[in-house]
Structure formats: structure tokens, C-alpha cells
Image (cartoon, rainbow, N blue to C red):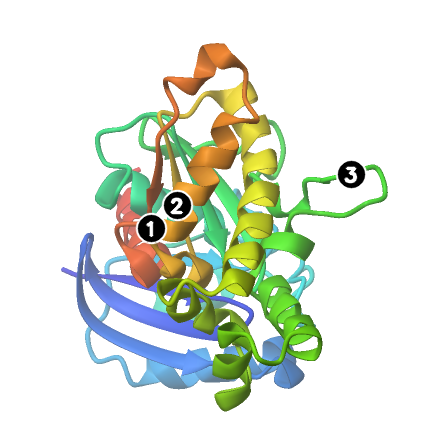
Amino acid sequence: MAFLGIEIGGTKLQVVNGRAPQVLRRRRLRVEPAAGAQGIKRQLEHLLSDWTEKPEAVGVGFGGPVDWRTGTICRSHQIEGWSGFDLAAWLHKLTGVPVSVDNDANVGALGEATQGRGSGFDPVFYVTLGSGVGGGLVHGGQIYHGASLGEAEIGHVRLDRQGTIVESRCSGWAVDARVRKLILREPESRLSRLALAAPGNEARHLAAALHENDAAARHILQETAEDLAYALSHVVHLFHPQILILGGGLSAVGEPLRAAVEKALRECVMEAFVSGLHVALAGLGEDAVPVGALVLAQKKVAG
């Protein structure tokens, strides 16, 4: 029997069924932030009513802090109306099967650690660079939650005493903003021209501009990589993961981003730990959270 995996983010909603790592069926919808949590719940009700095969269990990766023990949402930083909502109980009522809910970055980390690029490494640290920045640590095939609710909120790590956080510098939206400023300052740069020709989600043009060796694109890449590496250096010093995996939409920049982060990271950590550094791109890509949700569902049944 197949399992159901759900990803609830700030910009997208994905529902898949299958048995990790295989996805047999997929539905993907855009989230309308103005519709709030009620809009997403209506989308889910419609999708699940159309699902003919009853799953054995449901796993959910949610974009925000979650009480993973109960499946209750603490809050969403992007969509209003989720605070205090018992998502696990609501989905159990809809489906009639066991439900497990966790933070989306934790679930993505579980997917990458067990089915993706982190397979064979332990511990595994995963950072997702999307509309926000999240992180997850997996040790022994299990998500590390710590003593409390527990997600590895690397996006909220401060980069200075003034309160600048990683998310404000390294998220896709942060890079979008940098490109928009570049357009005003250097409208003739290749990156500016690409972004002007197809406005919106400006960070998606970074890879093409880098491929054409655009100096402005290289500068934005370097700034982003250095900020992210500085944050990841704390992860290395505290948890010593065997591998650090870069995922999320911004990771589509590919090898230039990976190489820049690894180089900057080597300059941030103690010399004793440099030889053990291994930075990689996510193997599952945008399927990290859906596949991780399938793993979560399978673990729910296995106990």
C-alpha cells in the first residue's frame, strides 16, 4: 500500500503518494498567501477528496515551527491563520489514517539523509534556500529535535549584533531584492538585463548570468555564499555533520553556489575540522520534502 506525503510551504502545496523514494502520483498547486490557512485547507480538502487510493499513513512537511509530538502548528512566518491549528488531527479526520507532521526543513533533511545525497553519511545537515531559509539535522536516520519543539532554525541565526539573520541575506527573496537593487545601479549588467526581460523571482536568472561570467552575478553569489558559510560554520563547530547539503530553489544555481559555499566555509572553521568538510547539492531537488514526508509516514506506521 502507498503512503501520502504533503508539503505545505509559503508559495507551493504538493501532495504525492508512493513509497519512498518512489513517487507514483503528484499534484502541485500554488499557494495564495492572501487566502491564508483557510485557502490552503480548502485546497487540501479538494485534493484529498479526489484521491481514490486510501493511503496507509500521511506525512507532512510544514513551512514553519511545529510541535512534532502532537502535529500542532506553532505558526507560519508567511501565511496567516495557522497558529495553534492541530493539523494532524484535521488530516486524520479527512483521511482516517495515522498522520505525522514536522517542520518542512526537518522533513527535507530526512528525505535527503535517507533517500538522497546524504545516504551513507551520518550526521547529515540540510539547509533549504527557498522563500525562507530552514535547516534540519538527521542522526541515525532520525530527525534531531533537541529538548523542545525542535527544528534547526538556521535561517534565524544572527549574522551580527544588529539582528541581521541568515534568512534576510540568503533566502531566494533576499537574492531577488539584491537583483532588483542591481537593476537600479547597473541596468546594463547581464543579470539586470535577464531580470528586466522576465521580472519576478529574479534569483532564477543568477545561474544563467553566472554561466556568462557576469561580474555582478559573481558578486551577488559571493556575498550570499559568504553569509551562508558563516552560519554553517556554527553548525560544523557544534555538530560536526559528515555532510552539509544545500537544497531549495536557490540551490538550482548549482555547482557555482556549492563551490563558493565550501570555499568560504573552509575559511570560517577551525583548521582541525577543515579536512572533514563535505558540501553537496541536494540529490532529490524539489522532491526532498515530499519524499521526506513519505519517509515520515512510513516511520509512523513502523513505530
Q: Quadrant of residue 119?
A: top left
Give the structural element (helix, strand or loop) at label 3.
loop
Task: For marks 2 and 1, give the CA distance.
Answer: 5 Å
Query: Which residue has dot 1 on it?
Result: 255
Asked if the residues shown at circle 2 and circle 1 are in contact, with their CB atoms under 8 angstroms apart, the answer is yes
Task: For marks 3 and 2, give the CA distance.
Answer: 23 Å
Give the structural element (helix, strand or loop) at label 1.
helix
Q: Do we see residue 74 in this rendering? A: no
What numbered label is drawn on residue 258? 2
Quadrant holding the C terminus: top left
- The answer to whether 145 appears left or right of 177 in the picture is left
At horizontal 47% and vertical 31% (from top left) the residue drawn is: 144
Q: Quadrant of residue 123?
A: top left
What numbered label is drawn on residue 160? 3
Vertical placement of residue 35 versus 11, above or below: below
**Structural crowding at the residue carrying mark 2, measured as other residues with C-alpha within 10 Å and reported as few (<14), some (14–19) or many (≥20):** some
